Amino acid sequence: MSALLRIGALWRGRWPSLTLGAAVALASALVTVALMAAAGNRVATAVGAAGLAMAGGVMLRLLGAGRVVLRYLERLFTHDATFRALGDLRVWFFRGLAVRAAGGLGFRRAGDMLARLVNDIEALDALYLRIFIPLLGALVLLPLLVIVIGRRSLVLAAIEAGFFLSAALLLPWWTARGALRGGVRQAEAMAGLRVAALDALSGIREVRAFGAEGRMLALVQARQARLFAAQHAQALRLAYAGAGAFLAAAAALFAVLLATPLLGVASVLILFLTMAAFEAIAGLPRAGALAGHAAAAAARVLGAAEAVPALADPISPAAPPRGHALRFEAITFGWQPDRPAVFEGLTLDVPEGAHVAVLGPSGAGKSTLAALALKVAAPQAGRVLLGGVDIATLAAGELRQRIGWLGQTTHLFDDTIRANLLLARPAADEAALWAALDAARIAETVRALPDRLDTWVGEGGTRFSGGQGRRLALARALLSPAPLLILDEPCAGLDAATERAFLATLNDAAAGRSVLLITHRLTGVERLDRIWRLSGGKAVAAAG
């Protein structure tokens, strides 16, 4: 319940529309009950019931038309409010995830997060539409049912109230308890299937090259079977809940029929009223099973978006630095406590305006420097300073506005060139976009395209060659106003000629900015002020 209440609190910005939808839904339920009561009254009058209010044909028509209109408005308002609330929740989830996963998700977590973003949030539509709305109707209809029946028979009113509570509260509570465990299994099974499917699709070339189609398919099918088993168990709970609701309604109607000799023709009115009341709550027992699934989904969504960040921002961040000289001071750092440290007392400087290269073999910690500078990781000892200010005292967002980053696996989104560039500076005008493309020496290629800046780059930039894609990524980094650029193996995967051309472009394009070039070797075309070499967890000045 705490997870569901937390989701409800996150929807507070949508409470006016959610309240309006609930009010219309409640009005629709009351009009439905009134229509059935009027119909029952009409039937009773037709067979000679004395003392009952006459419900004329005009009243029936008005109530019938009102029911149709209110049912339509109920669907319109409640579904609109739900979709908007879920949209807000997805935005909130993505923002929370972006704060807590600045260093990337990794493949397995990506599949799991996709399941949370899509399936788990979709499961939460039941929270309002199939749980809250029917429960609200039940809370209003129960007193109405007891009052109307109690005026004629207190014993029958108590019996009907017992069946009503069983269908509206006890049965949903019972199914929710079992469905909570099943909901966790179903959510985890869906995440596992997504991971396996994404793994197979992402590596389809390797799968075919090694003839592993059968093995990968078997893994996907095994995960699928696990999901089907969890869904089957959930479907059984829904079936049992539906059957329980049907039996409770049938028992309530049977009790009215048994009391007919005592009630006389008034039993017709009570029979119609009972039918309408149980129809309004018919979905609540099934909602109990959905509540268990929704609670499990809510816990998974909150667990990802509200997890404690690896590096939380300080409560009172320091003022942003005026300069942008970067200094690693006596850094000791290791990714895992049970593994050797990557750095032990490393000190390294990138003076303001200087172009500095850091060399080292794979595993020497070159990319770790970028992670430390971008506040994705924190040293166990020592400090990272930007403009003389310890970055541990700065807000991560403020820090990253001052550092542009271009990595060996920089991602190009399946969107236009324009949209990919604007990621670095959303307010940039067209002139600024072309200036960045000119600086990266890719502008002429873009100008030759039919749609120019509005050309679709394809998934991962597949419509461009490796060198062209890297230049588009460089243009995006250059478009950023950040005075410090960190380039982590920016030429990975490029042939020697393309690499030299790219670095020659970088020499001119990054003029006036501080540059930290992280690479395993130099080509000879770089213009550098200082070179550091990583060895034994320390930085050794190789030149400068």
Image: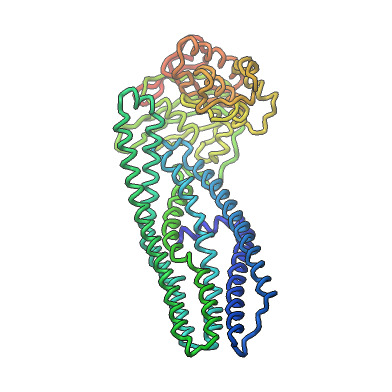
Query: Left of 126 or right of it: where is 380?
Result: left
Q: Is residue 529 above or below residue 432?
A: above
Residue displayed at 35% across by 25% down: 206
Residue displayed at 52% across by 66% down: 134
Numbered-mark total = 0
Q: Is residue 71 above or below residue 452?
A: below
Query: Left of 147 or right of it: where is 236?
Result: left
Q: Nearer the viewer, residue 430 or 173?
A: 173
Query: Residue 170, image x and y in percent?
Result: 41, 71
Query: Residue 133, image x and y in percent?
Result: 54, 64
- Furthest residue toward front: 47
Chosen colour scheme:
rainbow
Query: Residue 222, image x and y in percent?
Result: 31, 42
Q: In which image quadrant can residue 402 be found? A: top right
Q: Is residue 345 above or below residue 506?
A: below
Q: Nearer the viewer, residue 256 or 404?
A: 256
Q: Nearer the viewer, residue 309 or 22?
A: 22
Query: Left of 303 or right of it: where is 128?
Result: right
Query: Residue 508, image x and y in percent?
Result: 60, 15
Q: In which image quadrant can residue 495 be found? A: top left
Residue displayed at 53% across by 11% down: 501
Quarter holding the N terminus?
Answer: bottom left
Q: Is residue 58 above or below residue 21?
A: below
Residue displayed at 44% across by 60% down: 291
